[in-house]
Image: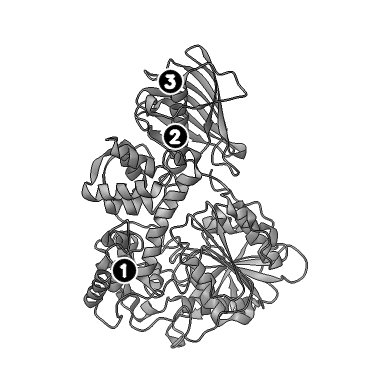
């Protein structure tokens, strides 16, 4: 569904009475949702404060109740390089914390170098550099001695300067992803101003201390994500009792014999694609489309390829690979700054090279460290592929010049504060892997670690249960009952098999509450008709809404605020059953479809489908009624 503007009540858009003259009010750069905006000037280089300054930009949503706020909730959306004040992040956190804004202010900060805080715009890499090594070298040269001044330690000091300028005594630090490093750096430097920490899918110490091991955690989580997406789905798990084995065989097959062909992307463009191990890992596995669309289809696509049907896998590659129409152009640096990503991302982790060495020597040191790893260290991926997709910093950061040591995330000898800390992560997260988040959480003496089933990266985007825990924790500093996190909030639709013909499909189950008169052949035809419906709807969530169907035919989507309406024409999931009709997806995630079936795999007729798509709760069945070949239909097909 489209991103919805939050319905949140906030206080007056003005600086708090405690603000000092160092907090300067200024117009909001983006969409104003009721915030007061401004900046605080900080030294670019704190060791040489006369060498220049940065304006650290903030958006502040004030509380609604009378009296002073209990705290300011300081939020960071992660990155590095991403803007926290971008509407996507702002909408997300306002929806999570809507119930807390009666007594707490909400403070959004752009880290130095990104958003509107002295944004780094290195044009060669922001708007199309090739090769990257040359672009990164140029960017570091452009920054000069400042190239070392964007480490998270300096970001923590910026945050403290804003807190002091606004006059808050206590803050609740709430972060997503890479923001875990921001929170860690702040917490170990300024513990007396912390009320609590909420770390959602945090990247953090000590998992940044060994870059090569961190990549291993990512590759292991990729396999786990694929396994769980299939295991949670009744449609997938019945056909794939060992999805890890299916994935491993696919990787081995593609490594030996890459696949090339033509397929439609999610916008209906026919394109030539190549599926080799690198593209398979980088685009299809590690970067799931939509709500795990590609993840839920990959093992079925692997099985299809083993049966000489390459269409599903070629389509996944076409949909997952997003070429930039004008070269490698990352667009507006105020939304995402590649230069800031490099300046912080190359400074914070510990890499297997010496920064004192020349860039070419660093490359050699990195290669030696990789060569010393066990042969199966990144299984089922090869070393080269794992290190090219999981995190690319290992091959890019040697070219980033660091004239001096950056301010570290955690200073030597620092202590982690004894404050209430809630740490959450998704068991299907392959960005902040489940092997590394507990390490980050264990550093905080009063941390509670919560694994959220069925969630990807940043659990508040996947689980209502998790958002309630986060909101209540800020209010009460108590975690409460976490039982709701042990089952997926939503089981996303997956695929068990890509039936080339309807006879290859699993038959729909007979509805015991209906009067079913059709036999096995039509029950299989109904299965592929429902699959065609879900297949089109999934493509509408990741593309423009106008696309080709898997085997033949097409569909178009009209996106309305309260309802999506898809119209399919001869849409074929299998080669011998075509589906035409209207699909509606609306309030409460309800789905209805009125479809006409034709083709050699069915006697033909019309069916009505009703159920839910991507709905929270346990997986139920679509109920299918109608008539095929003049016989009454009463069948059931799983919703996921």
Q: Which element carries disc 3, helix, strand or loop?
A: helix
Against 165, is 469 above or below? above
Q: Position of residue 259 (x, y in %)?
A: 24, 43
Q: Nearer the viewer, residue 322 or 8?
A: 322
Q: Position of residue 290 (x, y in %)?
A: 45, 46
Specify whether 239 is left or right of 142: right
Give the mark nearer the N terminus: 2 vs 3: 3
Q: Residues within 10 Å of mark 1 (few under 14, many from 20)?
A: many
Against 358, is 13 above or below? above
Q: Which element carries disc 2, helix, strand or loop?
A: helix
Q: CA distance from mark 1 to mark 3?
A: 54 Å
Q: Quadrant of the N terminus?
A: top right
Residue under circle 3? 521
Q: Nearer the viewer, mark 1 or mark 3?
A: 3
Q: Quarter-wise, where is residue 546 in the image?
A: top left
**Residue 159 visible at all:** yes
Q: Which element carries disc 1, helix, strand or loop?
A: helix
Q: Residue at coordinates 25% horizontally, 68% vertically from top-left?
A: 134
Residue under circle 1? 394
Instruction: Answer whether labels 2 and 3 touch (C-beta < 8 Å).
Output: no
Q: Nearer the viewer, residue 460 or 507?
A: 507
Residue farthest toward the top in the current orientation of the protein: 630
Identify the mark at residue 282; answer none if there is no mark. none
**Residue 31 visible at all:** no
Q: Nearer the viewer, residue 81 or 537?
A: 537
Residue under circle 2? 536
Give the mark nearer the N terminus: 1 vs 3: 1
């Amino acid at each position: 569904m489209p991103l919805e503007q939050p319905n949140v009540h906030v206080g007056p858009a003005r600086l708090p009475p405690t603000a000092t003259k160092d907090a300067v009010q200024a117009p909001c750069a983006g969409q104003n949702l009721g915030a007061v905006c401004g900046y605080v000037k900080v030294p670019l280089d704190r060791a040489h404060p006369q060498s220049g300054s940065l304006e650290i930009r903030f958006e502040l949503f004030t509380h609604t109740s009378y009296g002073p706020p209990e705290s300011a909730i300081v939020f960071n959306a992660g990155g590095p390089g991403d803007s926290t004040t971008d509407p996507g992040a702002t909408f997300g956190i306002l929806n999570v914390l809507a119930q807390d804004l009666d007594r707490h202010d909400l403070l959004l900060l752009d880290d130095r170098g990104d958003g509107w805080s002295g944004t780094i715009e290195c044009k060669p890499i922001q708007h199309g550099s090739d090769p990257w090594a040359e672009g990164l070298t140029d960017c570091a040269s452009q920054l000069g001695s400042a190239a070392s001044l964007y480490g998270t330690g300096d970001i923590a000091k910026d945050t403290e300067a804003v807190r002091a300028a606004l006059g808050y005594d206590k803050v609740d630090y709430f972060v997503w992803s890479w923001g875990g490093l921001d929170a860690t750096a702040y917490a170990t430097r300024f513990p007396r101003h912390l009320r609590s920490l909420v770390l959602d899918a945090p990247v953090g110490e000590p998992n940044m201390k060994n870059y090569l091991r961190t990549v291993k955690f990512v590759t292991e989580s990729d396999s786990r994500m694929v396994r769980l997406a299939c295991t949670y789905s009744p449609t997938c798990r019945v056909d794939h009792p060992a999805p890890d084995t299916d994935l491993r065989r696919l990787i081995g097959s593609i490594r030996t014999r890459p696949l090339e062909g033509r397929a439609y992307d999610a916008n209906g463009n026919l394109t030539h694609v190549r599926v080799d191990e690198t593209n398979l890992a980088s685009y299809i596995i590690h970067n799931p489309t939509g709500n795990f669309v590609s993840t839920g289809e990959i093992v079925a696509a692997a099985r299809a390829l083993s049966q000489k049907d390459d269409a599903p896998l070629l389509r996944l590659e076409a949909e997952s690979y997003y070429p930039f129409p004008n070269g490698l152009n990352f667009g507006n640096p105020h939304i995402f700054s590649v230069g800031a990503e490099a300046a912080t991302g190359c400074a914070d982790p510990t890499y297997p090279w010496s920064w004192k060495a020349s860039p070419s020597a660093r490359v050699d040191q990195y290669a030696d460290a990789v060569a010393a790893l066990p042969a199966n260290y990144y299984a089922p991926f090869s070393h080269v592929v794992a290190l090219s997709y999981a995190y690319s910093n290992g091959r890019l950061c040697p070219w980033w010049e660091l004239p001096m040591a950056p301010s570290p995330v955690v200073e030597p000898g620092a202590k982690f504060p004894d404050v209430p800390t809630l740490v959450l992560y998704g068991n299907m997260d392959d960005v902040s892997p489940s092997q590394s988040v507990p390490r980050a959480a264990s550093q905080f003496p009063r941390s509670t670690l919560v694994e959220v089933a069925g969630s990807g990266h940043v659990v508040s985007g996947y689980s209502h249960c998790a958002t309630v825990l986060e909101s209540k924790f800020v209010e009460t500093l108590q975690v409460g009952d976490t039982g709701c996190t042990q089952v997926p909030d939503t089981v996303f639709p997956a695929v068990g098999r890509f039936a080339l013909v309807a006879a290859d499909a699993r038959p729909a189950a007979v509805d015991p509450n209906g009067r079913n008169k059709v036999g096995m052949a039509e029950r299989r035809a109904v299965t592929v008709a429902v699959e065609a419906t879900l297949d089109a709807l999934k493509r509408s969530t990741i593309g423009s809404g106008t696309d080709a169907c898997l085997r033949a035919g097409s569909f178009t989507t009209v996106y309305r605020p309260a309802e999506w309406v898809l119209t399919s024409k001869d849409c074929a999931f299998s080669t011998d059953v075509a589906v035409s009709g209207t699909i509606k997806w609306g309030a409460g995630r309800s789905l209805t479809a009125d479809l006409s079936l034709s083709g050699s795999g069915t006697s033909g007729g019309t069916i009505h489908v009703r159920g839910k798509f991507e709905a929270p709760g346990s997986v139920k069945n679509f109920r299918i009624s109608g008539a095929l070949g003049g016989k009454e239909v009463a069948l059931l097909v799983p919703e996921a």
